[in-house]
Amino acid sequence: MLGNSLDRPATRRPCPFLMLRVLMTTLLVLLAAIFFAGFVFTSFKARGISEHYPPLGTFSEANGIRMHAVHIPAGENADLPRLIFIHGASGNLRDQYEAFAAKLEGRAEMLFIDRPGHGWSERDGEDYDTPDGQARAIAETMKDYGIERGIMIGHSYGGAVIASFALAHPEMTDGLLFLSPATHPWPGGVAWYNDLVSVPVIGQFVANTLILPAGLQMVKPGVACVFAPNPVPDGYIEKTGAEMVLRPKEFRANARELTRLNAYLREVAPRYTEIKAPTVIITGDSDDVVAPEIHSEGLKKEIDGSELVTVRNLGHKPDYIANDLAVAAIEKLGGLVRDLQALAENVSQRIAGDDVRCN
């Protein structure tokens, strides 16, 4: 009997620590596979995006970094001063180029600039993470194209840049057009992923593996929220290269400037009373991206003689939805007589029925 019992195999209980090690190893392998796949996809897709949206313009050197811009000469019968267009966050020069180039071609010399770190412009170091550093690069870029002064047009974050430009270079500023500007400190912060990718090492890792595949799913709804309650124009995402911001270096540059903006504006906004250039501010009362009562109304109070034009039921994109009004504002800054308030009322009536929801 004893011999028979020894012949039977002993029954062993599974070791819980061994099972945990196996489980952890499996999870680590799966995570490594996911991150590796994300890295490969990001590298491949980012290259494809760059090839799909090649530079539209030419390059120049500004304070040691390469700047990309589209320069359009004035026509023989030009009736407006030189115009310099500065795009907002998460964008590139194609955004303003598509909105204004064809409408104003021949009437003025125009310069559309990729801000440092965006589109095809480089960014080297933290000096260009804030609007004042970007304003310096823009001033140098203007000079490279022989433009000593002009009317500065800035949308959203570009509004903070042209405000800083006017403070640093009043002799180069013929006028200012703010389109739904982000120019003042605000309560709260920015989206959590901007904070995450701004962190050294970890942020670079996330940007190179996860942001682009996840971001591609968010481009269309994200753009819809920027325009809401107004509809997105046909072909807007493709024409403006909206996916370019998902490239790792550009996404991190965009995130760093957003995370530093609020603190920067707390220091600089009190100086807006020093701005003396003719100024027009166009905003929408339904802008859910930046609060008009903080930014646009703040500029109106602080810049002496400025004109605030508020359009009812307009979201964050007056450059597209109220393009005729924006062009009229440029004309007024250029010395032509334009009733912007009457034009704003026309736009308000035209878009009164817009009711696009941001999901």
Image (cartoon, grey):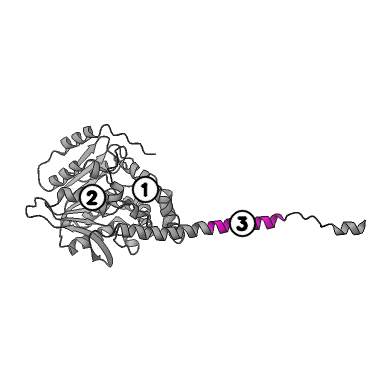
Closer to the chain start, of discs 1 and 2, is 2
Query: SS of the residue at dot 1?
Result: helix
> In the rendered structure, which amino acid carries the disc numbered 3?
Met
- Image height of 95 relative to 66, above or below: above
Please state if 164 lies on the left or on the right of 146 as rendered.
right
Q: Nearer the viewer, residue 318 or 258?
A: 318
> SS class of the residue under badge 2?
helix
Is 221 magenta? The answer is no
Label 2 vs 3, first from the N-terminus? 3
Measured as percent of width and height from the top left, residue 89 is found at 32, 51
Residue projecting furthest to the right:
1
User: Quadrant where the C terminus lies?
Assistant: top left
The boundaries of the magenta stretch are 14-31
> How far apart in space, not on screen, are marks 2 and 3 (Cα)?
51 Å
Q: Which mark is residue 98?
A: 2
Give the amino acid type for the residue marked by disc 1 in the picture. Val
> Mark 1 touching mark 3, by CB under 8 A?
no
Which residue is label 3 attached to? 24
In which quarter of the view is residue 47 placed? Answer: bottom left
Q: Secondary structure at mark 3?
A: helix
Q: Residue at x 21, y 58 (%)?
A: 70
Q: Which residue is mark 1?
A: 219
Tag 2–tag 3 contact (CB < 8 Å): no
Dot placed on the residue nearer the N-terminal end, 1 or 3: 3
Main SS, magenta region, reads helix
- Quote the CA–CA distance across marks 1 and 2: 18 Å
